[in-house]
Image (cartoon, coloured by chain):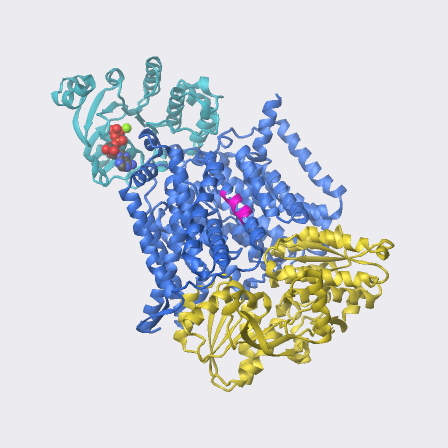
Chain colours: A blue, B yellow, C cyan
Amino acid sequence: MTLAALAAQLVNGLASASALFLLAAGLTLIFGVTRIVNFAHGSLYMVGAYGAWALVDRFGPASFWAAVAAATLLGAVLGALAERGVLRRLYDAPEMLQLTATFAFVLITRDALLWLFGAEDRLGPRVPGLAGTLTLGPLTLPQYDAVLVVAGPLVLVALTLLVRRTRFGLYVRAAAENRVVAGALGIDEARLFTLVFALGAGLAALAGALQLPREPANLAMDLPAVADAFVVTVVGGLGSIPGAFVAALLIAEVKALCIGLGTQTIGGVPIAFPQLTLVAEFAVMAVVLTLRPQGLFGRVATALPTTTLPEQRALVARGGRATLLAAAAIALVGIAGPLLADEYVRVLATDILVATLFAASLQWLLGTGGLTSFGHAAYFGVGAYAAALAARHGWPFAAALAWGPLAALVWAALCGWFAVRSHGVYLAMLTLAFAQITWAAAFQWDAVTGGSNGLFGLWPPAWLADRTRYFLFTAVVVGGAWSGLRAITRGRFGYAVRATRDSPLRAAASGIPVRHTQWRAFVIAGGFAGLAGALYTFAKGSIGPDALAIPRSVDAIVMVLLGGLASWFGPLAGAGVFTWLQDTLARTFDYWRAALGALILAIVLLFPGGIGGAWQWLRARSR
Amino acid sequence: MSRRLCTAAAALVLALSASPAALAQQPIKLGELNSYKQFAAFLDPYKNGMQLALEEINAAGGVLGRPLAIVSRDDNGTPGDAVRVAEELLTRENVALLMGTFPSNVGLAVADLAKQRKVLFIAAEPLTDKIVWENGNAYTFRLRASTYMQTAMLVPEAAKLNKKRWAIVYPNYEYGTAATTAFKQQMTARAPAGIEFIEFPVPLGKIDPGPTVQAMLDAKPDAIFSSLFGADLARFVREGELRGLFKDRPVFNLLGGEPEYLDPLKDEAPVGWWVTGYPWYSLDTPAHQRFLKAYEARFHDYPRLGAVVGYSTVKTAAAALRKAGSTDTAKLVAAMQDLDVDTPFGIVRYRALDHQSTMGAFVGRTAVKDGKGVMVDWHYADGKDYLPPDAIVRKLRPAP
Amino acid sequence: MVAGTLAMSGPLLAVRGVTRAFGGVEALAGVSFDVAAGERVALIGPNGAGKTTCFNVLGGQLAPDRGDVQLAGQSLLGLAADAIARRRVGRTFQVAATFASMTVRENVEVALRGVGRDAGLARATLERAAAADLADRHAGTLAYGDAKRVEFALALAVDPVLLLMDEPTAGMLPRDRRALMDAVRMATAAGIAVLFTEHDMDVVFGYADRIIVLDRGRVLADAAPDAVRADPRVQAVYLGEDAA
Ligand SMILES: Nc1ncnc2c1ncn2[C@@H]1O[C@H](COP(=O)(O)OP(=O)(O)O)[C@@H](O)[C@H]1O
Ligand SMILES: [Mg+2]
């Protein structure tokens, strides 16, 4: 790579950095003030792109800038509506609940856009007057990119002025600093939050609209966008706008360099740097958060965020006779029901059981441990792959099945060691980063993991190959493991873990090593997730990278919240309803994602305690 | 433009029950699964194609005296869900066979399930070579020309140019890496010594076009081979045009001529690229004209390649049932060996050797006509001419 | 031998030149004092004087920038809060911290196990803290004063040689204050040293053997209650202000 080429790549990186910053600025602004992690940020970005496309398509390329403005406005209005309609009710809820609510918006937005615009990619025209290139010495830069290079810093300056120099900014800063104080100062918090949400959402839509000349509007742009925005926001330090700018610059330049470097031989080993772009941002995030858990410009949280629901503060179920009877009844119905029904019910029930164990392991982490993992699929996947690889190497079935959780345990021990050094959203993002890195390894390590295809031919031995037998086997293993996890939860160690969640300060003052305890909790969660993964492998006969991709982590979170963070039968209820609904909805209803989103919203708003919470409420009422 | 996936499935069943002959007999159910939401641009026309074939077959009295019915499911684009819906089709719907799937990983997972559950699987769209070779099995057959074959169709033109330094840009997953490997292998075998390849893998769906094009410019290649498609292709084309990457450089793009990927580019479609694809607007063989007219009459839209694939998949199932004279899996699998099927591209044969059909693709160059990208100077590359010698294929497949 | 004997006979707690700053503010600026075994010492000073910071340094919640803290001759520097708890230093917090999702008995059981003691001692511990009446209550739903009593029990659960109590009676009714402090006196009669802060001067002068006055991070006075009461400087910065 020559010096001129290097310089050219750095300039290219600037355009990407600007785009990234525009995308992330709104997210960090919203978080800084409202503390809501807005998962739907990528959806607003997508709305911006489609909105601009629709207008440009209708009124011609000359209307581009007007279309950008209109799309921005549209995003702002949608953001304000979402804040007023839903999020307002969730300001005091734990962050996981807020995240889940915004995730419901992701599902709904995607189906709405599919319904409105169809599935085809929508490429916008080039911008009139900016369709050509700019030549700077050896470098040819598209004029539009040059505009972007300027637009990022302009927005940075504008936002900084807004925050530093205006009354609105003063309020924003006050609210970001301390909500109670802001309220005491007579700031109308409700209005401020709506405005901030509108501004942040508008910025997301602006970023999407500005992207239109570079990228066709398409239905797959939301999740990658929000993942990027998260990474930039977290690396920069949540709530810090200059931080987001620096982080965007850092990540975009690292990526540009990776692409520019191409395949280089270092010490005799060829390294394909462009391959690293798949995880460059996550690798950057992992490094930054490990060294600076609060991000580059983030402030150390003085008070630990409380992440407990009222339901979580409820006492541990004493496990009296009634509970035992209920558990026995569930087991009986859960096994006898599928046996009496048609064969497919047993296939579905096997899936539900695997999901139950996975959800139970996450419930242990989220509910009992208060550790918000956003990348739990990593351990599910590692367990699944480890079992698959063992089976491929001719290990007996039982050994392969046991190796899955063991490997997941080891991996969780490694990732968890770093993760428990962070808290709250940072911990969630760090676990996400580890999961993405794990995913990328599975996706690209062709020789071992089969790459994007995965591994095949992994069926249980002949005596278990029958669907009914494998269902029964799964029921026994999941039943046993889940009981084991329950025993841990209710035992000494479970109490120690709850103690670290209830009050880390008090736990430490009582001789409990908080981090170490949390780390062990993380490892245990990883092990049980790994067992679920191993069972999954043999149920499906194959395993691929999707086993540890983001959607699987999200599904598990939704299942846990659906079932109830604190309810002992929550994992089964959540996994059962979620899997069954998805199976049925997908067969009978085109826009089942949107329906699922609506259902999640309803649960979050009406029953923050999930199905378990609703059950408690019903029982309390009937008394 | 709205996708009424399941309503459509219901409509299929209704359509057949409306015909009087159908009422007499229980339909033969074909189990179909695909990633309708993930790859809707391809699969909407695919669904139409299936429906057209189904209606034609049932109007002609069905198969074995019974009407056909398609039970369609969304596999969510993931192997795990695909296996589940396939199990549902097998256990609850008692389908005679499985067909469909789009991405390679899903196709391979369902192929493996077919082997485990001993049921015929007609893989419609997955391009991976592995599904008939390394991971091939007795129950799985594949319709579309594979990555290897389509690459092989472009190689003769590429080799003729006698270029030394090739830049290869590809989406970094099975399809892209397989295309890259096949291209390098076949070019090295044909081209002069000293041929060089510089690779530019990009994350699927997330190409960073500025830096990628810049890096390709810096590499100063003589020619370019790309296997990009979809949004990645659109971004690459626009950025490359702007920065003059394609000036005086021949470009080859696998699948680039498929309407699914060419049409969104509109008047910005590249000019003079060598591509594989489907020139429905100028393909005037009788078989295709018949299909084209029927399709346009039925759906008031022009067909995409997906429509041909869906249509031909159902035709394959019908032909297999007819030849087997039964819905018994062993007989169906036997019938699939060297089965000839009438498709819009002519007669294709499912080779007994490796279960790959000989369906070909069209090779030509891109041009812009009336503000739309089209293929010109094309010819049909018959699949059978672009497969490795039998002895090699035998070695690639696992022992049965 | 001599050194060993000295250490044994030295103070239980020795604080030496402890400094801790937050940004520009020196919350503690070279604080030194001793606490002997079994002694009850009050740490007083106006708001923001650095009392809580001092407790946090002693309890391992904060690391000092400079200085040393020794317990029975051994430095506590670099030890995490849980390790300090296992060296039998119990503490309460200015804002009562309990395990909200457990009953009071479970709270104490967790604390007992935290330092490797038998959970069966929960009943006895609660009785010592005069909080046995709360045993089956849900800690998350306790009135604030009751939570303070529970915290005292939790501090006792580490079987302390030294108790650190940051405003143990803040937010309590005067009657309950006396009851709690009586319990403290009873529980610590067996030779447990207590370092506590308090705003209620009746409590301070009623229970302390010695008083240390802190002002803007510095020790202003360190003497017997009567001497402190008479000290004009103390009156100026603290008592005067309090009286005003
Ligand atoms: N975590 C912190 N961050 C910043 N400043 C702090 C922090 N804790 C205490 N301070 C400051 O240190 C000084 C002493 O506080 P503190 O020890 O709480 O006083 P006291 O308990 O005597 O009222 C005060 O000026 C306070 O603002
Ligand atoms: Mg204080």
Picture quadrant of residue A130: bottom left
Q: Based on the picture, tell me whether residue A290 belongs to the magenta stretch.
A: no
User: Would you identify the image quadrant in which residue A394 lies?
Assistant: bottom right
- Reply above or below: B254 against B158: above
- Left or right placement of residue C158 versus residue A346 in this view: left
Camera-side residue: A19 or A527?
A19
Farthest top residue in view = C175
Q: Can residue A561 be seen?
A: yes
Vertical position of residue A167 compared to residue B322: above or below: above
Q: Nearer the viewer, residue A493 or A336?
A: A336
Inspect this view and state whether residue C73 appears: no
Majority secondary structure of magenta residues: helix
The x and y percentages for residue A86 are: 49, 37
- Vertical position of residue A312 compared to residue C149: above or below: below
Instruction: Tell which quarter ligand 2 is in.
Output: top left
* Residue A427 point in image, percent of width and height: 42, 45
The range drawn in magenta is A102-109
Quarter of the image where one finds residue C216: top left
Residue at the image position 67 percent from the left and 44 percent from the top: A475
Q: Which quarter shows the C terminus of chain A?
A: top right
Residue A3: horizontal and vertical position, in percent? 31, 72
The residue closer to the viewer here, A464 or B212, is B212
Does residue B72 appear to the left or right of B58 in the view shown? left
Residue in view at x 57 percent, y 64 percent: A450
Question: Residue B313 at what x, y percent from top left?
Answer: 71, 65
Residue found at the far right of this picture: B24
